[in-house]
Every structure is written in C-alpha cells, then in structure tokens.
Amino acid sequence: MTKVHPPQQQAIRPTPFHGAAAACSLTNAWRRWGDYTIADVYTTVDQEYDALRQHAGLMDLSPLRKIHVSGADAQSFLNRLLTRNVAALALRRSCNSVFCDDAGHVIGLAHLLRLNVDKYEILTEENHATWFWNSSAGYENLHLEVVTHEQGIVGLFGKRATDILAFAGISGAGDLDISAHDSFMVQRVKLRVMKTTSLGETGYFLSVDPKDALFIWELLMRAGQSHGAAPVGWRAQDICRIESGMLRAGTDFIGANDACHGNRPRTPYELGLADSVDLEKDHFVGLRALTMGVERPGRTCQVGLRVEGVEPITGGRILRQDQLIGVVTSSAWSPRLGYVVALATVTGGHEAPGQDVDVEYSTLVELEPQIWSLKAQIIEKPFYNNTL
C-alpha cells in the first residue's frame, strides 16, 4: 500500500518547472516549500502583484502534497476522515475540506478531487501522509500512493487567465464550472485542468507529467505575453492570499498534531470553516465533539482587520479597552485597497465587524526594543474578491 521513496530522494529538490522559472528570475531569490525550492520573488513584489491583479499570474504550485486514494474502500475511508460528505462529490468535481482529531480540532486543510468512481486525489499544503497512512488500518480494499513527485502543478490566476488558456490551445478549459476538472490535450501533451477561485481571482490548476512541465510553462508564458501575464513568486502570492482571506496552516492556525499546548488547536468553527462540516453524514473523526460543541460560542474566532499605517504587522497583540483579546497572524499592505489588512484570532464575543481595537507590536530601533500601538478596526472578510 505504502509507496516509500529512497532516502536520497528526500533531499530538497527543484520543481519540474525550476529551469523555466529560474530563467525568469532576476533576483535569484528562492524559498523552501516542503521538499522543494520555489521562487520567492522573480522581479519585484509590486510588479508581480500588479500582473496577477490586473492581468494574470503564473505560479509554480508543484510542492503541494498529493496523495492518490483508490480502491473499493476509498470513499468510505475518506468519508471517515474528512468533514465533508465525500459521497456527494460528483465525478470530475472537487471541494475544500478539513480533517480533525477526535476532539474536533483541525489537523489540516485539504482539497479533494474525484478522479473516477473509486479514485480520488488529496492536495494539502503540509505533509499529512503519515496521518493518512496510520488512519488506513482495517481497510482491505484501499490503496494510498504519494504522487507529489510524479506531478507538476502550475497555477494561472487573474482576469485574463481564461483568455490565455484559449490562446495556448487548451480549448474548453474556460467552459469548466468552478471546482470542476477535466483532462485536455495540447500538442500531444496530456494535462488535467481544475478551475477554482483562489487568491481572490478565477484561476486554474494545471497538473502535468514532470517531463512535460517545461513545455507547459513556456507555452503559457508565450500565450500570456500579449495579455500582460507574468510569473508570480511566493511573496506576491501571499499578499493576494491575505487579501482574499485564505488561512495558511502553521501561520494562521496550528494543526492539532503540531500544537504543544492544549489551547492552541482550533475547531473548524473557530476558523470560520463551518461550511466545510457536514454533521448529517455518517460518522467521521471529530463528529461527536463538533456536534456537542456546535451550540457553544467559540473559544476564538478568525476575523479581518484594517490597520492604520503602511507597514505590515508581525505578531501584533490585539487589545480592546486595554484588554488583550487576540493576536494578528498574517498581515500585508494591500496595493489594491490602499491600507494594511490583517488576519487575526480573537476571543469569542469580540468578532463583530465595526469594533475599534488597538494593535500593539514591538520592533528593534538601533538594537533597542520599541513598543508601538496602531488603531485598527474589525472588518468583513474577504477584503478583496474579484470572482463575484
């Protein structure tokens, strides 16, 4: 059942798109994501942000962890682990979900694709393969396979993304419904295209065999030249992520298996992910805890903030009438909105939009710690959404 990669293959590696991405990089700035390195910045963050928001952005998403789940027990297995009703997922459709521990605390976030009747693909940002494997005991007709290194994924997001795919000869991809996916052929190269709404834009995930990755990247770059498209690195992507209100594991919350303190894990309700939980389906891990706690006010809530000033805040403390009520988890200056936006965790009862709060944070000024305080207001998320 388990596919084990040789130890020498566990070293940090370039993605299938690295050669083409490196040719686009003027900064030689890279960062680690899982088993790979990806571009942090290609040119400047401002240029890449503008390309994505005004035209289209091309991004290397190959480090996403990918697990194939297949066999007669695949649906039963996934339905027990994920909070959504997997049985309701139609062929060639996808959905977001979460998976929890017995206490109803979120272990991680997942995107699930149904490939055929008894085969699914799980995409996660973090590595949860061990947890899935450990949870598979007792399922005789189940096959799990890590395919992270067997697929390259390139994302194309922005208002011109559909036009670029058509110009590249990937006919019909633009006709997909949101969350649908299908296989396409372009110049004898097979790829899977999934349509989605992420980063506040309509976009596409293109999954290809690693041997075809450079061809697909260059095809999209050529098709995007006349449409203002550009490669977009991690930092510009992260600004767009925050603007669209997307949570990042390890940044905006700590997974239940990684938390060292009992008050750190969060339920889906505390993370604003209640729409990913189906309490009416058959048993899943965490169901009893979530059912018992569904009527209780959350210990914490995820909120959005508008913060004065122009500098993002790192780890700011949120106070209301001098009482500590939360912490800033992610923040960014939003060029589109013209102010600093932040994702934050606050204690229950302080989440109502329109409330004025203070954000306190510290910096070093000439090696001396300085405490600063900024005015902020709780506002609705997402801060930006161009998909409505």
Image: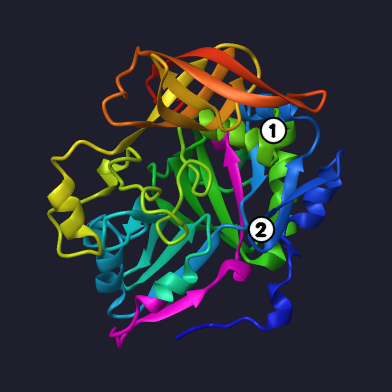
Q: CA distance from mark 1 to mark 2?
A: 22 Å
Q: Quadrant of the C terminus?
A: top left
Does the stretch in magenta take in 98?
A: no
- The answer to whether marks 1 and 2 mark residues whose Cβ atoms lie closer than 8 Å is no
**In the picture shown, does residue 138 fall above or below 76?**
below
Residue in view at x 42 percent, y 45 percent: 176
Q: Which quadrant of the view contains residue 316?
A: top right
* Of labels 1 and 2, the one closer to you: 1
Viewer-proximal residue among 149 and 160 = 149
- Badge 1, how many Cα within 10 Å: few under 14, some, many 20+? many
Q: Which residues are magenta?
A: 134-162
How far across and how far down the image is residue 115, in percent?
Answer: 40, 65
Residue name at image x 57 percent, y 18 percent: 340
Q: Which residue is mark 1?
A: 229
Task: Please name the residue that numbered disc 2 is placed on.
Answer: 187
- Residue nearest the viewer, comparing 321 with 334: 321
* Secondary element at tag 2: loop
User: Measured along the vertical axis of the image, is residue 14 above or below residue 177?
Assistant: below
